[in-house]
Image (tube, rainbow, N blue to C red):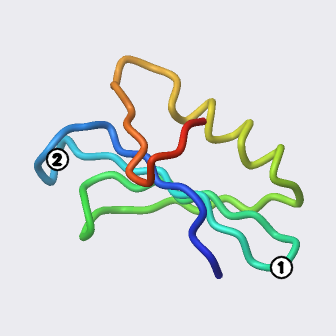
Amino acid sequence: MEQRKHWWNGKWGRIARKDVFLRNDADQWYVEQRAGGAEGISRFYEYDSEDEAYDAIRALLDGPDEWRPLDGGTI
């Protein structure tokens, strides 16, 4: 599995930090939504296309947080 993108909400601390990851394995796309840093709780979503995965990511990043790409990418 290859990690393609990573965004975080710019907040430090276990309670405030949120991350979203985009991963790819063969023809499957995976989105991980994590709250609470490395030891936090994650939700995983699986998609058949990159476009579907990006649609989900756009919805997850919508809101008051100021999301930042950690890999230099954009949405």
Q: Position of residue 34 (x, y in %)?
A: 40, 56
Q: Nearer the viewer, residue 12 or 73?
A: 73
Q: Are marks 2 and 1 in contact (CB under 8 Å)?
A: no
Q: Residue at x 13, y 45 (%)?
A: 12
Specify the label residue 26 is tagged with. 1
Residue sitting at the far top: 64
Tell me the quarter of the picture where residue 23 sits.
Answer: bottom right
What secondary structure is found at the residue carrying circle 1?
A: loop
Q: Position of residue 50 (x, y in %)?
A: 81, 52
Amino acid of disc 2: Ile
Q: Earlier in the sequence, mark 2 or mark 1?
A: 2
What secondary structure is found at the residue carrying circle 2?
A: loop
Q: Going by the image, does 10 lie left or right of 75? A: left
CA gap between label 2 and label 1 equals 34 Å
Q: Going by the image, does 56 lie left or right of 14? A: right
Residue carrying label 2: 15
Q: Position of residue 28 (x, y in %)?
A: 82, 70
Specify the label residue 2 is tagged with. none
Residue sitting at the far front: 72
Q: Residue at x 51, y 32 (%)?
A: 61
Amino acid of disc 1: Ala
Instruction: Mark 2: give few (<14), some (14-19) or many (20+) Cα within 10 Å.
Output: few
Quadrant into which the N terminus falls: bottom right
Q: Nearer the viewer, residue 42 or 55?
A: 55
Q: Residue at x 83, y 79 (%)?
A: 26
